[in-house]
Image: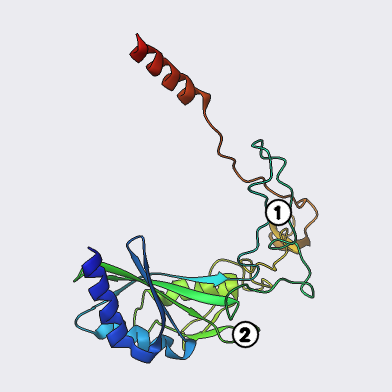
């Protein structure tokens, strides 16, 4: 299996050449990263090359790497009860734009990740690119290569504000057309600015300031030792001793 993966990696390197920024193979998964200016050309090569034949786009999503790598919860110097894990610093949604954190270990904030499938060779590939401009993240649209990218790109535009140049109908798909902002950006307010409800008296949808939701920090799940397993192990040892 490792030899096959190595041959696959060599094939990708030979095909993409300078268009390939990074390549990694971990846990049986292959991930490549290309520069934004090579996004469309690399995708076309992956689809059209007879030795790869990635004819299906399974998924496309946006990623916001703002505050990526910053821990918000203590994971070592705390008790096992969970509620002693205090908030560490400014996590997503809990900072002002002027004092926002900056991405760690990456050159740009917004990225797009695509998962491709080759039915012919029963092989999957993850492709990623970072948008060059953090203020206006833009990448070429893949709809011309894989029509299934249509709604995925609209979703990434709606939730992250990533613009896909050349998309035939780049509109919001989950939020209302008049919605302000992009909900999956990490600097988006946790409770939002307005809430939407249907007013039976006015017989229409109305927008109102959010007043009914209090911001809160969720406590992550804590994995604890289960006494049932300890008891079963003790009984098993006691039975063996007899």
**Looking at the image, which is closer to me, 194 or 98?**
98
Residue 135: give x, y in percent of width and height.
66, 84
Could you tell me which residue is drawn at 41 percent across and 73 percent down? 114
Residue at the outermost front position: 241
Q: Residue at x 58, y 69 (%)?
A: 159
Query: 219 above or below 27?
Result: above
Residue 88 is labelled as: none
The residue that mark 1 highlights is: 200
Image side of residue 184 versus residue 210, left or right? left
Considering depth in this image, is 117 or 80 the residue closer to the camera? 80
Dot 1: what SS?
loop
Q: Residues within 10 Å of mark 1 (few under 14, many from 20)?
A: few
Q: Secondary structure at mark 2?
A: loop
User: Is the residue 210 above or below the residue 52 in the image?
Assistant: above
Q: Is residue 204 left or right of residue 48?
A: right
List x then y, in percent, for residue 134. 63, 82
In the image, 185 versus 32, the foreground residue is: 32
Q: CA distance from mark 1 to mark 2?
A: 39 Å
Would you name the residue on which mark 2 appears? 136
Q: What number of labels is visible?
A: 2
**Screen quadrant of the N terminus:** bottom left
**Would you identify the image quadrant in which residue 234 lies?**
top left
Q: Is residue 19 above or below residue 9?
A: below
Expressed as whole percent of the image width and height from the top left, the position of residue 218 reads 67, 47
Q: Residue at x 59, y 80 (%)?
A: 108
Q: Which of the marked residues, 1 or 2, is nearer the chain's N terminus?
A: 2
Discs 1, 2 touching: Cβ within 8 Å: no
Residue at horizontal 28 percent and vertical 87 percent from the top: 15
Nearest the eye: 146 or 89: 89
Residue furthest top as drawn: 242
Tag nearer the camera, 1 or 2: 2
Residue 8 image position (x, y, % from top left): 25, 74
């Amino acid at each position: 299996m490792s030899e096959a993966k190595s041959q696959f990696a060599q094939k990708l390197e030979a095909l993409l050449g300078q268009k390939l920024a990074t390549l990694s193979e971990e846990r049986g998964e292959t991930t490549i990263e290309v520069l934004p200016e090579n996004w469309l050309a690399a995708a076309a090569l992956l689809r059209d090359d007879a030795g790869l034949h990635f004819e299906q786009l399974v998924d496309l999503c946006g990623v916001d790497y703002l505050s990526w790598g910053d821990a918000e919860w203590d994971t070592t110097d705390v008790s096992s009860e969970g509620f002693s894990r205090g908030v560490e610093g400014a996590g997503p949604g809990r900072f002002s734009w002027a004092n926002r954190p900056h991405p760690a270990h990456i050159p740009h904030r917004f990225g797009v990740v695509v998962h491709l499938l080759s039915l012919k060779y029963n092989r999957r590939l993850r492709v990623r690119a970072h948008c060059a401009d953090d203020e206006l993240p833009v990448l070429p649209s893949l709809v011309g290569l894989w029509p299934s990218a249509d709604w995925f790109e609209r979703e990434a535009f709606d939730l992250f504000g990533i613009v896909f140049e050349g998309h035939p109908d780049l509109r919001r798909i989950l939020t209302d057309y008049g919605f302000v902002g992009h909900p999956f950006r990490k600097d988006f307010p946790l409770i939002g600015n307005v809430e939407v409800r249907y007013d039976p008296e006015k017989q229409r949808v109305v927008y109102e300031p959010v007043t009914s939701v209090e911001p809160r920090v969720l406590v992550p799940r804590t994995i604890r030792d289960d006494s049932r397993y300890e008891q079963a192990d003790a009984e098993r040892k006691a039975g063996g001793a007899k």
